[in-house]
Amino acid sequence: MGLTKSSTGCHLLINDLTFLKNNCDYIVALAGNPNVGKSTIFNHLTGMHQHTGNWPGKTVSNATGNCLYHNTNFLFVDIPGTYSIMSNSEEEEIARDYICFGHPDCTLIVLDGTCLERNLNLVFQTMEITKNIVVCVNLLDEAKKKKIHIDLDQLSDELGVPVVGTTARKKKTLQNLLDIVNQVCTGKLRPLPKKVTYHPVIEKGLTNLQTVLENEFSLTPDLARWVSLKIIDGEETILESIEQNLSIDLLDNDALQEVKNRIRNDLLKNNITENNFKDFIVTDIMHRSETICRKVCTFEDENYSKRDRKIDKILTSKHLGIPIMILFLGIIFWLTIIGANYPSQILFNLFSWLQNKLFLLADFLHCPEWLSSMLISGIYQTLTWIISVMLPPMAIFFPLFTILEDLGYLPRIAFNMDGFFKKCCCTGKQMITMCMGFGCNAAGCVGCRIIDSPRERLIAILTNNFVPCNGRFPFLIAISTIFIAGNVQGFGGSIISTLTVIFVILLGITFTLVISKLLSKTILKGIPSSFVLELPPYRKPQFGKILVRSLFDRTLFVLGRAISVAAPAGLMIWLFANIGVDGQSLLDYIATFLQPFASLMGLDGYILTAFILGIPANEIVLPIILMCYLGGNSLINLEDTLSIGKILISNGWTILTAINVMLFTVLHYPCATTLLTIKKETGSWKWTFLSFLLPTICGILVCMLTNLVYHIIF
């Protein structure tokens, strides 16, 4: 098996198939339920690194990758994980449209060997559309641990299609899989799917409609049967998609309408209506699945999931679920706080040494002083500050977060929080995207694609910034260490700092719920969608892959985005600090102008100026504040919290100032990277502006309220 360079595409259009066909020999659609290891198989086959995880809903758009096997070029299309193709969500629509109208040469359906019965639902639905099916029973290693034995040969006989057992991490099993796929694509192996036989009245109606569709629209027998099923079902979105993709008009055909009306009358006589028709279909499919599983599956231990259920009773309990979630987050943040200090200091020292060398180089090249200052003290120092502050915490936070993900804990968090979000007319999946936002709000916004409802997805995007990202943690930690933890040193100080940061995070989550409720009752009215979330089995994390994936797919990706906006920010800050009138810099003029408004918020003009100039990256807010207080013309590099504290206190900071700064750090506009991501995800500047406005107004009002209450009391 040879691997070639791969490519990705989002929401692959059916019209792109002509181009794809010209660049490969065969196209293989990769389908399956969420969390069955589909993306892992895709990665191994194509050499790509599509992000995988132990929770449902990872793949929310089509990814493509090439695989060269026996001099044959296969293009694998990883379509979104879905439980069915009955079009109940965006993922199901994408999967359905590709399988139905993309005409892949082979559809490879990945099943979970530990819960075969539920997974067969998708197999039987796909059989209604195409014959070229290969079933891959994955996670056989997990099934073996649970003492589940599956007779793959008998399963193949029952389904009428080839069945291959795989353990995605073992390449040999994938070699067998590729061989079968190759035989199906080349026609050497011709599957004969044994479709589900429905209620006799339904089968009679399907036969009559199928005949009309074949005669009137020249549809193939398989496609005609599936379209007949959807016509009887009457699902408008599917019928619209059929008409659009097949270029036919199902409404303007007298023969078709006559047969359809006759069928519906026959169905009504047997108490089968539009409301319960789908129930009859699903019931017949599940009955067939149960029958097959009883024949092919052997369970040595009927209580194989007993351990998982015991753990879930604790982690998802009403009384312990939320406290345990807070404890886990607290441990992660505490380890991040403790672990990031030393590597950050090393990076600061390294970049400082390089900066001195760059100044010597500039002198040697006779570079004008203003130019060297702008390039080195402005752009270079801003870039290196962001790298030094962001990289160590992210390199710790993302692997720890990914461990929870691989363990299967993230869906439990969504389950615990679903009740709160449902009261806000949203979904518990929003909690997963919030957790992603702790690392980077831009990543959290992209992660909102896992939410089925467009309305709920938009609410999640608009409110994701209410949880502090990795770029805001260093500032929060520094302020809490100086003003909250006070003179407490060592372990006690770190605990107090951690508790303070956790409190701020809980405040952000509270605002997320409140604003979500407000949006649901005003401009984004709606009722909460049904939330069906599979709790995946607990699995041992793959630490090697976690390290690579979290560092390269997440840490460096987010850092790269931050750096891309940091360079122009460094230039802008240098210009504001070095250009002035009558001995005052532009920074001083801006701070003086903002002072009256800032004082109402319990801040000062320089703090507010720093937040405004910190739009490109939250990491540079504190350096700008220090630069303004010390009257410098470049960012100030101080890692010693004691020195930082003395500067802040000497410039009028009190405990009130510290509290309001922490509040505004959590409750203010997203950074430039997140704003651009929101624009890309929503496709609208209107929603992007609203995502800027919502947290900012909340931050201003909360700070003003805190300032007012403080002065009334004291």
Image (tube, rainbow, N blue to C red):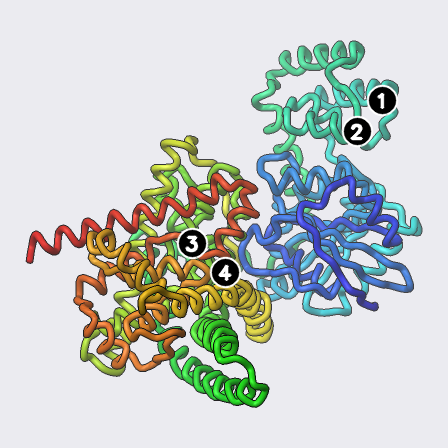
Q: Which mark is residue 246?
A: 2
Residue 543, quarter of picture: bottom right
* Left or right, residue 402 beside residue 85: left
Query: How far apart, in angstroms, are the residues tagged by discs 4 and 1?
Result: 48 Å
Residue located beneath label 3 in the image: 670
Three-letter amino acid code of the residue under disc 1: Phe
Residue located beneath label 1 in the image: 217
Residue in front for this viewpoint, 370 or 209? 370
Q: Are marks 1 and 3 in contact (CB under 8 Å)?
A: no
Mark 2 or mark 1: name the one nearer the start of the chain.
1
Q: Judge the density around disc 1: few (<14), some (14-19), many (≥20) Cα neighbours within 10 Å.
A: some
On-image quarter of the N terminus: bottom right
Task: Name the mark nearer the viewer: 1 or 3.
Answer: 3
Residue located beneath label 4 in the image: 408
Q: Are marks 3 and 2 in contact (CB under 8 Å)?
A: no
Query: How far apart, in angstroms, are the residues tagged by discs 2 and 4?
Result: 41 Å
Q: Residue at x 50, y 85 (%)?
A: 359
Query: How far apart, in angstroms, are the residues tagged by discs 4 and 3?
Result: 29 Å
Q: Give the secondary structure at mark 4.
A: loop
Q: Which mark is residue 344?
A: none
Three-letter amino acid code of the residue under disc 2: Leu
